[in-house]
Image (tube, helix red, strand yellow):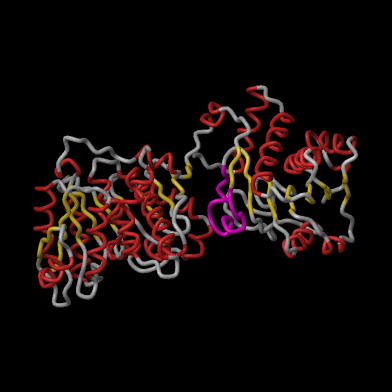
Amino acid sequence: MKVVTAAEMRQIDQDTIAGIGIPGIVLMETAGSEIVRAIEHHYSTAKHIDIFVGKGNNGGDGLVIARQLAHAGCDVSSFLVSPADSFTGEARTNLDIARNLGLKIEEIQADFAFLDTLDCDLLIDAIFGTGLRGNVRTPISNIINVINDLSIPILSVDLPSGLDANTGSPLGTCIRADRTVTIGLPKRGLLVHPGAELTGELEIVDIGFPQQVINAQNIKVNWTTEKDAAEWLPPRSPASHKGSYGRVLVVAGSTGMTGAATLTSEAALRVGAGLVTLAIPKSLNPILEVKLSEVMTLPLPETEKGSLAESATTPIFEFAEKTKSVVAIGPGLSQHPETVALVHQLINENRKKDLGLRMVVDADGLNALSLSTELISLLGGEAVLTPHLGEMARLTNTSISSLAADPIGTAEEFAQKHGVTLVLKGAPTITSDPNGNVWINSTGNPGMATAGMGDVLTGVIAGLMAQNMSSETAASLGVYLHGLAGDIAAEAVGMHGLIAGDVLKSVPQAITSILPK
């Protein structure tokens, strides 16, 4: 599903009206009808409803909602946060209709202490839409603060008033909605934090924007849905064998970090890769032989600290070339200088010799790259990097707070600059490819904020890449399945005790749940 900026949404609206000929008043009426349907579904017992109405199109939608709810028998009061004579266009038309029908409409004056005593079943926020410029000013900011302090459910029309539609940041003050019904397409700010939290439950309603108008915008940002994931999932042929589903070489682990190597290796198998081999420091081989039944091991030279030595580069290359393996590198690898040199050599030699090895780089692989960032652009378009915000800050020499302020732009810029696919892990996780396409993930939960989750994700992505998937599709699908497995596991054990092993075990169920019934 496409995700829009405020400007893209306005252009779609304008092109639908001017280019296709669907009048704005018709779009507003349809929007109001769809939102009323949502209200009747989610708040079926609400009979006394108060609506806060702004002077723009968002307020016009609110007045349509007021009229239709009143027609359905609800006791509806509309409070205008701007003077009635400032309403124009379709909003003015719907204000006049509401007045002609004798609906309860009141302009909020300078003294709005009466709001503290509101006693209704539902508040509807129709103050600002996507057109808000700059911070919310008084007295409306004060009105919003009062609304937020009331112990009454709030439904926002299109987006919570005061939210930046592009970044998800509050513009001074912002409505804290329990539910937001957004019109046409989701806006970026609804899906990233803090906007996602202020949005509450998100619902998207279709009001008839023609697909050709949407396509003309060439929108690059997407919200990964179950439909997308099901379409991406590689099929399994009845005549296939283990060689049909590719090989993964996991370069991971060091003394004290065998768990990361184990999780990554098993995840690649759980997502459907045919064969998985773990390249491990030789002294750890007996441990991994016990921990891993289905994964093969490749014991390699090691440092005195029990991490992979620089001399392991040659046998890794020989194995990966011979087996045509996707290489997942980094989990639990350590930051020993020789191990860092190994990562650098693998990237350098892969490009220099034009070997074409497809790599997924995570954890200590990313830490090694942060010491020589010029190597990032040598990875090639088939590489996938999976940093969390801390690792991303090291890769870009930027603060975590500045990256978190615009995660979509951060991922988009980095992927295009370096010609790689980037998976920026967070809430939500965002994937971007070298062509500027972005996918915002829709699965996952706070219980997944614990050790080892990233190791599982690395294995899942590598396992999908091994099945002849493009890097960007494998990354987007992998992130979706990983989050869905986390949601399934959380249903079983709860969020507080959720561990990476629970998610690993739930990957097959996540896949099964999206298969065509």
Residue 85 visible in rendering:
yes
Q: Position of residue 390 (x, y in %)?
A: 41, 66
Q: Position of residue 181 (x, y in %)?
A: 63, 45
Region of the chain picked out in magenta, as a range = 186-202
Q: Position of residue 515 (x, y in %)?
A: 35, 41
Instruction: Residue 192: say if magenta.
Output: yes
- Left or right, 274 with respect to 7, comes to left
- Residue 417 sits above or below residue 298 on the image: above
* Residue plotted at (39% across, 60% down): 489
Q: Position of residue 156 (x, y in %)?
A: 68, 50
Residue 397 visible in rendering:
no
- Left or right, 201 with respect to 305, comes to right
Instruction: Residue 21: say if magenta.
Output: no
- Left or right, 64 with respect to 262, comes to right
- Residue 232 sits above or below residue 44 on the image: above
Q: Residue furthest front?
A: 45
- Left or right, 436 with respect to 456, comes to right
Q: Quick one: 152 or 218, which is closer to the camera?
A: 152
Q: Quick one: 78 or 349, which is closer to the camera?
A: 78
